Amino acid sequence: MDIIEHIKSSKKKTFSVELLPPRNGESVAQVYKVLEDLSDLKLDFVSITHGSGGSLRGGTDALGALIRERYGLEPLIHLTCL
């Protein structure tokens, strides 16, 4: 189910968080730890920022796939525009 359908059909408030992928060359271990720490919150989806203003955010698409596969959450990848 896509996120809009989920929000429209939900009888409860929708709860999500936004993640910033690590910059190129940095470890993704902190992202995994955060997701593990938040697993009890029953998130509806996870928003992932894909850098802005020339910042380098590597692996955004791969992180979205991992969130879907490992945690069963729908990823919402978005660009921040300035």
Image (spheres, helix red, strand yellow):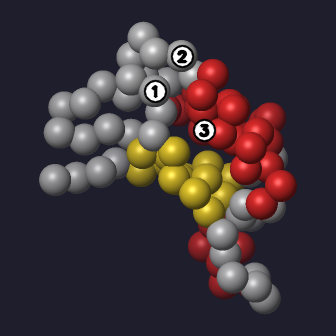
Badge 3 crowding class, 10 Å Cα cut-off, few under 14, some 14 to 19, many 20 or more, is some
Which amino acid lies under the numbered mark 3 shown in the image of this protein? Answer: Gly
Image coords of residue 21 (percent x, y): 48, 33
Marks 1/2 in contact by CB < 8 Å: the verdict is yes
Residue with the mark numbered 2: 27
Image coords of residue 74 (percent x, y): 68, 53
Q: Quadrant of residue 55?
A: top left
* Mark 2–mark 3 distance (CA, rounded to whole Å): 16 Å
Describe residue 27's horizontal placement relative to residue 40 as left or right. left
Residue with the mark numbered 3: 64
Marks 2/3 in contact by CB < 8 Å: the verdict is no
Image coords of residue 51 (percent x, y): 32, 38
* Mark 1–mark 2 distance (CA, rounded to whole Å): 7 Å
Q: Which mark is residue 22?
A: 1
Describe residue 72's horizontal placement relative to residue 48 as left or right. right
Q: Secondary structure at mark 3?
A: helix
Which amino acid lies under the numbered mark 2 shown in the image of this protein? Answer: Ser
Which residue is rendered at x = 46% and y = 27% of the image?
Answer: 22
Marks 1 and 3, the one that precedes in the sequence = 1
Image coords of residue 69 (percent x, y): 78, 36
Which residue is rendered at x = 22% and y = 52% of the image?
Answer: 81
